[in-house]
Amino acid sequence: MTAIFGAFVVFGGVMGYVKAQSKASLIAGSITGGLLLLSAFLIARGMTAGAILGIVVSLLLIGQFGPSLKKKMKVMPNLLVVILGLVTVATLVVGFFN
């Protein structure tokens, strides 16, 4: 789940740059998506730090896109980031305690 979310965030950053010439979207999407992909790699290696990193980055993205979703009910990217973030956090927390 973390790898899927990471790939989606990187893709979203690239699309933000292509559509709106937003360098901020490209940079933020690349960094946060890259951290989520790193998290997935660490989880696959059995490292607890991967789950912690994934939870922290996912919560940061939810914190960034959640208020924006409240103001404007936009499916892309706000709703998808919030839903994928919540699913990722839930998956990681459950996996962390098992």
Image (cartoon, grey):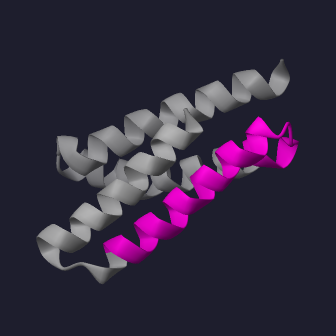
Residue 73 in view in this figure: no
The span picked out in magenta is 25-51
* Residue 19, position as x, y percentages in the image: 13, 68
Residue farthest toward the top in the current orientation of the protein: 98
Seen from this angle, which residue lies furthest left? 19
The residue nearer to you, when weighing 44 against 13, is: 44
- Along the viewing direction, whichever of 63 and 81 lies nearer the viewer: 81
At which x and y percent is residue 24? 35, 79
| 1 sits left or right of 15 in the view | right
Q: Is residue 30 a member of the stretch shown in magenta?
A: yes
The answer to whether 73 appears left or right of 53 in the picture is left
Q: Please tell me whether residue 36 belongs to the stretch shown in magenta.
A: yes
In which quarter of the view is residue 74 placed?
top left
Quadrant (top left/top right/bottom left/bottom right) for the C terminus:
top right
Q: Is residue 40 left or right of residue 85?
A: right
Residue drawn at point x = 77 percent, y = 47 percent: 42
Callout count? 0
Where 47 sits versus 90, above or below? below
Residue at the (60%, 35%) spot, across then down: 89
Residue 71: tell me if it is visible: yes
Q: Is residue 40 above or below residue 87?
A: below
Residue nearer the viewer, 11 or 24: 11
Q: Which quadrant: the N terminus?
A: top right
Left or right relative to 70: residue 93: right
Location of residue 82 by image quarter: top left
Residue at (43% x, 58% y) in the render: 64
Q: Main secondary structure of the magenta part?
A: helix
Q: Position of residue 76 (x, y in %)?
A: 21, 46
